[in-house]
Image (spheres, helix red, strand yellow):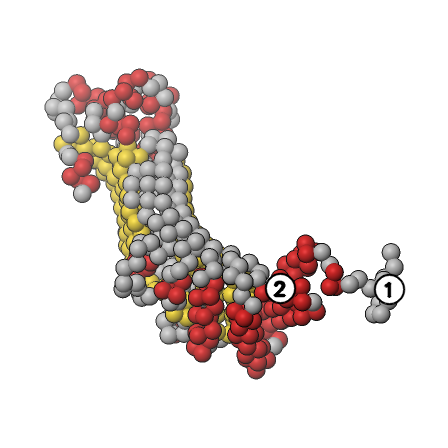
Amino acid sequence: MAIGTMKSPHMPDLHNLPDLVTDKILQLLPTKAAFQVSFLSKNWQGVVSSWPSLNFDEDDDFDRHHLKRHSHYQLQLQHIRFIYFLKGYLDYRKKNDQKEPLDKLRLHMRMYEHQDFSTITKWLKYACQRGLKELDISLVSVDSERLVEIYPYNYFYNLPLVAIATAKSLTSLKLEFVKVLKLWQVYEGLFPSLKILSLKAVRVATGQHLYSVLCQCPSIESLSLSNCSIGNLKFYVCCSSLKYLEVKSCLLNDIRVDHAFNLESFTYLSQPYSECGKMILTNAFNLKYINISVDKYLGEFSLWGCHNTLEASIKSKRIHRFKLFYGYLNAKLSFKADQATILVGELWSQEQFSSDSTYVPRLVSFIKSFSRCKEVRLYNKKVQALTVFKNYRKMTSLPPLPVTSTLLVGIPNPPVVGSRDFIELEDSLRWIAPSAKVLIMQVDAEEDRK
């Protein structure tokens, strides 16, 4: 095939390229480059003015591998040009507006300054008025890591949630280096279609401010927080649609997840040398995966409900209190705590331990999960639920709780001291925890849980 040159008959005619080819060429370019190239053809200009996906990245004009070689003056000059382009391209789209939908807007800066607020906000309003579905904003300031530590709120773009209130079709919202304020005014379903919310290096004054935003997301399925700062160190979410919750490198002391009926996965990875006072998850009956790592100390972890295939790993130098209510013997748990409180459904169902031949092996395997706990509290309804048969004990070389110092068993109607049931239960418990002080008490599990 002959290679065309300027003024050669073999030179392809840019004006007559098929629309599909034109679209493909432009899609391979960043939005800014595509806009500049579009002036080669009027047909191309029409495509760019109604493009459904926009990607603005301040780094596109630099070699990403040599950014540090550029002087601060060069970066500032480039930022000014970048802002001029954003303003000019917005005016161009408005002038040639064909009311075409805008599906995706990605805007990443590395030199954000206060005077850029108006330009960014105008773009948000424009995009959201055109049925925006995906919004990805990253507004890094100069020396952002230093500013995060010294000025945790003043140097961040203050996201005007009202400006994107018209984006009823928004399904994905990713924010980085922005500030989120409380919604003082109640909006009915501000983000009715939002399914994915990702917050990275986001600043929030209090947990209540973040909660006010999450309340406007009735369809949210995935929530991710990374390196976020919440003023009062409290995180609270109450959403039945939530399936995946991930919190990484956020300094928090109180975490509560309520009415998590559909939650399948929960991950929490703390900052180095940090502590957490409480983690409480309620109504998490579909929870299948837990991965928690708190560097120094976790005061309390409480889980009310889980899936029967739960796999949980909780790591910390010290966990003071672990609580599991309405769990299952099939659950696989890995942790070490000072005190553990357990209530599982099989211990309250007589049909389970009287008819299931696998009950005793599963019970012993489950109790071994708490082998590194100093104090263990077990709630059960019937004496037989914790009676491990002597012939099974002979086949098992090691007891489930070899280092536990206190084993407390709570039963609504405990057997009379000295009775056959009492002796068999006590004998079984002493085999389960041979070094422990064994206590059999009458207790109301529901009241004790409260």
Rate crowding at label 2 as few (under 14), some (14 to 19) or many (20 or more) other CA atoms within 10 Å: some
Going from the N terminus, do you reach mark 1 or mark 2 first? 1
Q: Quadrant of residue 285?
A: top left
Badges 1 and 2: C-beta atoms under 8 Å apart? Answer: no
Residue with the mark numbered 1 = 9
Residue with the mark numbered 2 = 46
Q: Secondary structure at mark 2?
A: helix
Q: Amino acid at mark 2?
A: Gly
Number of numbered discs visible in the structure rendering: 2
Real-space Cα distance between discs 1 and 2?
27 Å
Q: Quadrant of residue 59?
A: bottom right
Task: Answer with left or right where residue 79 lies relative to residue 206.
Answer: right
Task: Answer with left or right where residue 217 lies relative to residue 44.
Answer: left
- Establish if 204 lies above or below 291: below
Percent x, y for residue 304? 28, 40
Q: Is residue 278 visible?
A: yes
- Establish if 179 lies above or below 266: below
Percent x, y for residue 342? 27, 36
Residue at the (37%, 74%) spot, across then down: 154
- Establish if 387 lies above or below 17: above
Quadrant of the snapshot with the C terminus = top left
Percent x, y for residue 367? 32, 33
